[in-house]
Amino acid sequence: MAPTPWISFTTDYGLADGFVAACHGVIARLAPPARVIDVTHLVPPGDVRRGAAVLAQTVPHLPAGVHVAVVDPGVGTARRGIALAAGDGLLVGPDNGLLLDAAAALGGVRAAVELTNPEWLAPRVSATFHGRDVFAPVAARLALGAPLADAGPAVEPDTLVTLPAPLVRPEADGFTAEVLTVDHFGNVQLAAPAALLEPLPAAVQVGHQPAVHGRTFGDAPPGDLVVHVDSAGLVAVSMNGGRAADLLAVGPGDRLRVTAA
């Protein structure tokens, strides 16, 4: 494989400890030419679905390279460490559903391996820090052009762990959908595709709250809700000048009903 000097890095490690720096250090020592793009390290701890959504919505806009993601509440258990080839990219992380939406966004899984080659891992692998001891060294070697097949045995793609599909239910006067993510601004992203919002009128209702069916935040008066299609092509609920998630008292996994007013 040709070298892919870009590595993206997505985790729930936070910024208060040295975990991110340790992984950067492993990559820098093994693959000095590699350049790392930090997507985020503020995924809520253990929130695999949130990490999967962030990764899938980001990788199509990154340069071709290796995408490492670690949101791994099952670290040290029987869950597999994996690397996937998808489109023009490679994905590295735990086999817990975290990587598959991103793989689909890149064109689908072309090949998968389990990370078992001890020569690719740290000399001593911690039971609780596979980001440093498994995923970072594998990513570094892949970035230098090492063959994916050398990382470990092939895995059948249909054996990879998948996350449960979020609820999306069309209804006569609108739809009900699961909250997929809540971002830093309090915008509520639903799992609903844009096509479900298109037929609704200008005046809609989100739960028991009135809202505007608009294109952007400023289409609603200050302090009011607007339902729109976000930058990922999904339906979102936002507040002009405020936090929709707080007004609606919802978080990831909750359900919202959007209907004509």
Image (cartoon, rainbow, N blue to C red):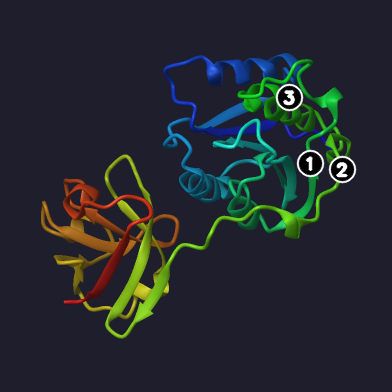
Secondary structure of residue under mark 1: strand
Q: Nearer the viewer, mark 3 or mark 1?
A: 1
Percent coordinates x, y for residue 177 in the rendering: 36, 66
Q: Nearer the viewer, mark 3 or mark 2?
A: 2
**Dot 2 corresponds to which residue?**
153
Percent coordinates x, y for residue 148 in the rendering: 83, 40
Secondary structure of residue under mark 3: helix
Q: How many marks?
A: 3
User: First in sequence: mark 2 or mark 1?
Assistant: 1
What residue do we see at 73% from left, 41% from top?
82
User: Which amino acid type corresponds to the residue marked 2 in the rendered image?
Assistant: Pro
Q: Residues within 10 Å of mark 3 (few under 14, many from 20)?
A: many
User: Which amino acid type corresponds to the residue marked 3 in the rendered image?
Assistant: Pro
Secondary structure of residue under mark 2: loop
What residue do we see at 34% from left, 44% from top?
183
Does 201 sit left or right of 57 as displayed? left
**Dot 3 corresponds to which residue?**
137
Asked whether the beta carbons under mark 2 and mark 1 sit within 8 Å of each other, the answer is yes
**Position above or below: 121 against 190:** above
User: First in sequence: mark 3 or mark 2?
Assistant: 3
**Dot 1 corresponds to which residue?**
114
Q: Residues within 10 Å of mark 1 (few under 14, many from 20)?
A: many
